[in-house]
Amino acid sequence: MKLQHVDLSELKLSPLNVRKKGGKDVGDLAASIRSMGVLQPLLIRPNCEGYEIVAGQRRFNALLSLAQEGQSDPVPCIIMEDGDDAAAIEASLAENVARLPMDEIDQYKAFASLREQGLYIDDIAARFGVTTRLVEQRLAIAGIIPPILNAYRRDEISADTLRTLTMATPRQQKEWWKLARSDDQYAPEGYLLREWLFGGAQIPLANALFDVAAYDAPVVSDLFNENRYFSDVQKFWTLQNTAVAKAQQDYLDAGWCEVVLLDIGERFSKWDHEKRGKMKGGKVFVELTYDGEVTFHEGYVSAKEAKRANAAAQTGEPQKVERPELTKAMQTYLGLHRHAAVRTELLARPGIALRFAAAHIIAGSGLWTIEAEKQRTDNTAIGESIAASTAMKGLGEEGSRIRALLGIDESDDRPVVCHASGFKEGRSLAGIFRSLLAMDDAAVMRVLTYAMAETLEAHSHAVEALGALFGTDMRQWWEPDQAFFDLLRDKAALNAMVRELAGAATADAHSTSTAKVQKKIITDCLDGTRTRDVEGWMPRYMRFPAEGYTGRFCPSAPGFDAEADGADTHAA
């Protein structure tokens, strides 16, 4: 860049200048320049006709007005290098964000230009000292059709109406604009506009994915236009959801890695996603409006996922799963319940406990320092669920009997196995050894078996291996409780559970229903309120080895390798 004085006749406005509104209000600025001159140089760059102004539109307009009065001196300018569009946009935006506020459309166009050149939302926000939410709000204007944007520029519609219309589909925007231009119809605004968009009271026949002949309720016709509507909203959504579920499966059968069903009314924001082909991990996003319109957005990944993928490609590290099927809290819940069941079943297999204890002594484990497994969790609901389980009750009862065998005071409710530094009087190594010397082999084996169960590490290969070896049936030790359903968040997994319990037709009919509705179907099947297809149901997460419902399932602890399958079980 260099500073140079340029004749006013050589300057033209640049199409990259982001200010499109408010640039001609220069009365105060012209007075300032008339008395003090141009205090801040214009930012320009060469073009075929001279120079184009990247930043400084108001100063340029003020100078033009002064030229009509006979004042036309060369203008101080900073000349940029040619060919740097992104830098030009950034320079113009950086200057104008701090000056007279641009309207939202100007900001959208500026931010959109940078987004198209590869900058992510957080990058744009950081560069210009604004929040990511402001950038997202401006980019949301991308969905507004041009006639509405032009009307906003002419002050014919309010900013609140414009912002609400960012939540409308292009079809809904066209319908609203038709109402706005009509002489005898009213275009809703404010609260009524939101009701119009999200009420869903009128569902046109044109929005059906299914054959309308399958709909067996009346159709309502508007006598004053050609529109026809479904009279029974519930029947419509049952048929529509079934059609969406079929389309979802068709996409998966065609090789798409994932089909994401957005909640009804949730907008798909193209500005927050990047295009990806089917073979490059692109997904299909299904967008549903309250009035039944369905849009399939093929070949996209979220901007966050794309950014992580790009970073992983540069570092060579594997990309993390964007949204695992199980939350960390759910993995803790499942792991501790499975652990409680396996360690309790170990009590009945002293031969295996002896051999497993020897393996611990030889190979070690995360717990053989030595201390008891405490089943830690910061989640109160998980802790209460584990404490109330049948498995923990059985383990606690045997613990009381073992303490009695070892002569430990009944008021001492600590684990039988604990650090030497935590011993009370009567729990020294010598005292425990003397108690064991007085027992026969069967009693000693019982103590050893309990000690092995107490020191079995949670969330470990050991739990998985023993559960598979025992053929542990979690239905004997656990049943779905409120904590389980509170922690169950994945809608795809919930729908698969509905399919197992209530059948394919019900699952398809509720493919886009909320998680709350699908959980209610599951609990109704379990408590007998609703007929279920299977008895003795158990979620796949509680099997040994654990299984999931989607390709995103990541178990909390991996199972043993194939060598474990051939383990010697004759001592069981």
Image (cartoon, rainbow, N blue to C red):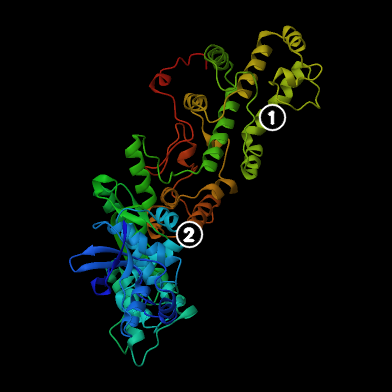
Kindly identify which residue carries mark 1.
396
In this view, 264 is above or below 248: below
Percent across and percent down for residue 459 are 53, 31
| Image mark for residue 388 | none
Residue visible at 53% across and 52% down?
A: 523
Is residue 408 found left or right of 225 in the rendered image? right
Category of crowding for the residue at label 1, using alpha-carbon neighbours closer than 10 angstroms: few (below 14), some (14–19), many (at least 20): some
**Residue 516 seen:** yes
Judging depth in this view, the residue of 294 and 507 nearest the camera is 294
> In the rendered image of this protein, does residue 369 appear above or below residue 335?
above
| Residue in front for this viewpoint, 361 or 534 | 361
Res 131 label: 2
Q: The residue under label 2 is which amino acid type?
A: Thr
Along the line of sight, which residue is nearer the eye, 317 or 339? 317
Q: How far across and how far down the image is residue 148, in percent?
A: 34, 78
Residue displayed at 35% across by 39% down: 312
Q: Residue furthest top?
A: 437
Left or right: 188, with 463 as reference point: left
Name the spot of residue 267 as percent of width and height, x first. Answer: 39, 64
Q: Looking at the image, can residue 291 be seen?
A: no
Q: Nearer the viewer, mark 1 or mark 2?
A: 2
Task: Classify residue 203 by image quadrant.
Answer: bottom left
Q: Secondary structure at mark 2?
A: loop
Q: Dividing the image into 4 quarters, which one contains the N terminus? A: bottom left
Q: Residue at the location (69% across, 21% down)?
A: 418
Determine the image quadrant of residue 157. Answer: bottom left
